[in-house]
Amino acid sequence: MIKGIDFSNPGHLKLCLLSQGINVVGKRIFKYAEFAENQYPYGYSSKLVKKFKQVPSELILPGEVVVGLHFRKKSPWSLTYELKDKSIYLTHKGKKITKVWFNPKPHFYGEKLASGLRCERVAVMYGLYTLSLFTRGWCYYFIQGLPCKFCSLAPTRSDLGKKNVLNISPQVAREAVQLALSLDKGRILYVNYTAGACRDNDLGIRMQLKVLRAVKKITPSQVKHHLLTIPPDDFSLIKELKAGGLGTLNFAIEVFDPDLFKEICPGKEKYYGYEKYMQVFDEAVRVFGKGKMYANFVAGLEPLASITRGFSYFAKRGIAPSVNVFHPDPGSKLADKAPPSIEYLLEVAKAQTEIYSRNHFKAIYPKGGTRNSLDTEVYRGFFK
């Protein structure tokens, strides 16, 4: 057992796996089930994935808790297949903990668009219920030698993710989403949009707006649309995002400490700036309303006192903290940095739980959640 961790709590298990990763021994474990293959639109957390022809995008724990597979040789966590009941189990130090599953393969994977392009090179399932479009698979900060130090977008797109579309046009986005909706009816509850940074921040938003508008026209009204992006210089574009059908918006501040922001996110500091981020957050929550605007943090890049101070700062302004857990990606400048400890993540999750409960915040994706975030599990009460 691990202090403070309940192995019967799938939210706690996810936290452990995000901290310690998983040790996959041999190649046979991925032959026992069909799954949504990781398409690598933005990053991968270990060179060990190259040993396998195909790797699942996510592991599904009991209660539909979704977690990314981060391969680490020394992890105490592993997977085992039981021939007796034809099931896959998560183990800790060799002891069987719980039955697990892989994210089911969507019906639209392998289907071709009019151009002959496979649909999953444009749109992928991000968790159980979210369709994700990485509309711009490059980032100006990499071109300038100033990427966020935890990011591996450019290395991934030149390696495992090189078959994915680099720039997704509104027409191609609409075609891919329409095909996904038709073949996986009822599964898609959310559409997520994100992109690497443009040199012109306003142009970047306008490009995403065109994709949003094209996709929004063909999606059922119950499907929610979310955007994670670099903010615009022209604050009036935030109103256009809302008018275009966007339900929730997220600006990635990454770290709250201004000095660490300059160190870890040099491109964001140079081409936008910490103070301007603070200003645009206030404008965005005015447009979208309390609880519809999010500030994204990367847990593990700053001390506990700093990140929780950031939670409180934004919560007072009606902005919900959203947290992704740091994972050291090959090719990134922090490839050799250790992931955050279980103890650190548990305190982060408890602090976020208190903020969500007190302010009646919802997770961006209340159902299903995403692979590297504890937002949905926090919202669902796994850390109360």
Image (spheres, helix red, strand yellow):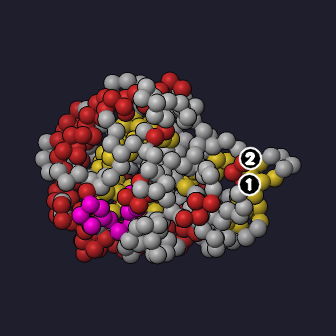
Other-residue count near label 2 (Cα within 10 Å), few / some / many at <14 / 14–19 / ≥20: few
Q: Secondary structure at mark 1?
A: helix
The stretch in magenta equals 141-153
Q: Is residue 41 above or below residue 316?
A: above
Is residue 256 visible to us here?
no
Other-residue count near label 1 (Cα within 10 Å), few / some / many at <14 / 14–19 / ≥20: few
Q: Quadrant of the N terminus?
A: bottom right
Q: Nearer the viewer, residue 138 or 68?
A: 138
Mark 1 = which residue? 28
Instruction: Say if mark 1 contacts mark 2, CB within 8 Å.
Output: yes
Left or right, residue 365 beside residue 234:
right
Residue at point 74% right, 51% down?
88
Q: Position of residue 100 (x, y in %)?
A: 69, 51
Q: Is residue 258 above or below residue 193?
A: below
Q: Position of residue 251 (x, y in %)?
A: 29, 53
Mark 2 = which residue? 32
Is residue 37 visible to us here?
yes
Q: Amino acid at mark 1?
A: Arg
Q: Secondary structure at mark 2?
A: loop
Q: Amino acid at mark 2?
A: Tyr
Q: Position of residue 160 (x, y in %)?
A: 49, 54
Magenta portion: prevailing SS class: loop
Q: CA distance from mark 1 to mark 2?
A: 7 Å
Quarter location, residue 16: bottom right
